[in-house]
């Protein structure tokens, strides 16, 4: 048996152990992505093998939380893919305005950049006050950062250009206070936001929603888990509700391809059939 094959077996055992011990299910995540992240964790934790990492994780919850940071590496930015937000303003907002109240689910919200981006957009369109936003993720560390709404000024300067290209109606600086090299975002943006732990791999639907945004999450899932997620979204969305995906994600080859219509295909915005 080759060393690579042995390592693949060790990784499968580690992922199974994490599920049995901590109920975090990575078994249907894309193999190449999980393998890459575990190798990164090995380097950072100075474990000599995946089996050594498994032993540490099984006997030390702190070690598991450390591993979780590597398995759910947050990669996000505000108003990422500005044309996506332009399409929401153009194609989705006019229809959202017909609802007396709104519920929005941001699945896989990571450290909150998308939460604040969407909250700003909804405020500028006069919808935030009548919207409840559910922002969910499996990483409690990321959720805590999202709750705080504090980001480095270096990043926020880059986000400003995104905001402007996304059709922003104000000065981006109106939404945060600069202090000690950080930008602290206006707490009123999250007044109607509920941050909650939720796994697309194991948990069920918790509310009926008019809009779901799940961007750059499904690329880390295999097809089986992608279809499970699409099933949750379909169940959660109200009649003719909206689903927004990342630029490299699509419904078209899933088991739910015929359950949604493409509203803005290039920007990956769909509407429940």
Image (cartoon, rainbow, N blue to C red):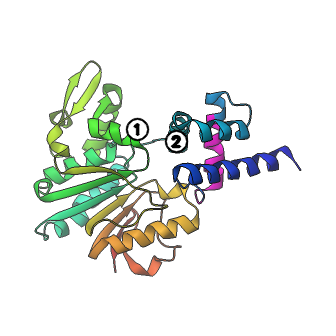
Q: Which residues are magenta?
A: 28-41
154 vs 56, left or right, is: left
Q: Is residue 2 something one can see in this rendering?
A: yes
Q: Is residue 26 above or below residue 240?
A: above
Instruction: Give x and y (percent) for residue 47.
Output: 69, 31
Q: Would you call the spot at circle 2 few (<14 residues within 10 Å), some (14-19), or many (20 or more)?
A: many
Kindly indicate the quadrant of the structure image that contains residue 267: bottom left
Viewer-proximal residue among 245 and 208: 208
Q: Is residue 239 above or below residue 60?
A: below
Give the camera-side residue of 234 and 247: 234
Q: Is residue 80 magenta?
A: no
State left or right for residue 72 relative to residue 151.
right
Could you say which quadrant of the image residue 160 lies in?
A: top left
Residue 31 magenta-highlighted: yes
Residue 206 on image: x %, y % = 31, 65
User: Is residue 166 among what the camera can see?
Assistant: no
SS assignment for the magenta stretch, majority: helix
Q: Are marks 2 and 1 in contact (CB under 8 Å)?
A: yes
Horizontal side, residue 186 vs residue 181: left or right = left
Q: So how many labels did they put on this image? A: 2
> Where residue 141 is drawn, which disc sits there?
1
Instruction: Give 263 or 9, whichever is nearer the viewer.
Output: 9
Gap between marks 2 and 1, in whole Å?
Answer: 9 Å
Expressed as whole percent of the image width and height from the top left, the position of residue 223 reads 57, 67
The quarter of the rendered structure image containing the C terminus is bottom left
Which residue matches tag 2? 68
Q: Nearer the viewer, residue 197 or 88?
A: 197
Identify which residue is drawn at 53% across, 49% down. 22
Work out which residue is located at the far front of the displayed protein and give it: 59
Mark 2 lies on a secondary structure that is: helix
Pointer 1 local density, CA inside 10 Å: few below 14, some 14–19, many at least 20: some
Mark 2 or mark 1, earlier in chain: 2
């Amino acid at each position: 048996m080759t060393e690579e094959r042995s390592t693949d077996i060790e990784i499968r055992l580690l992922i199974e152990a994490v599920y049995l011990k901590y109920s975090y299910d990575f078994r249907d995540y894309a193999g190449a992505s999980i393998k890459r992240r575990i190798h990164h964790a090995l380097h950072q934790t100075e474990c000599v093998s995946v089996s050594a990492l498994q032993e540490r994780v099984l006997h030390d919850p702190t070690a598991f939380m450390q591993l979780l940071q590597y398995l759910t590496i947050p990669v996000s930015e505000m108003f990422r893919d500005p044309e996506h937000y332009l399409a929401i303003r153009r194609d989705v907002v006019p229809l959202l305005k017909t609802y007396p109240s709104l519920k929005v689910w941001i699945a896989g919200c990571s450290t909150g950049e998308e939460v604040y981006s969407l909250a700003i957009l909804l405020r500028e369109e006069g919808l935030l006050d009548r919207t409840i936003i559910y922002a969910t993720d499996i990483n409690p560390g990321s959720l805590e950062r999202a709750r705080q709404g504090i980001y480095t000024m270096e990043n926020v300067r880059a986000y400003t250009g995104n905001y402007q290209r996304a059709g922003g109606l104000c000065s981006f600086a109106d939404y945060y206070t600069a202090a000690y090299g950080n930008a602290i975002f206006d707490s009123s943006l999250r007044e109607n936001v509920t941050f909650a732990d939720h796994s697309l791999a194991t948990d069920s639907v918790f509310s009926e929603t008019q809009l779901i945004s799940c961007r750059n999450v499904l690329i880390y899932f295999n097809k089986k888990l992608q279809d499970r997620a699409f099933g949750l979204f379909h169940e959660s969305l109200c009649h003719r509700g909206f689903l927004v995906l990342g630029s490299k994600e699509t419904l078209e080859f899933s088991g739910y391809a015929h359950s949604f219509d493409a509203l803005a295909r290039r920007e990956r915005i769909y509407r429940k059939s």
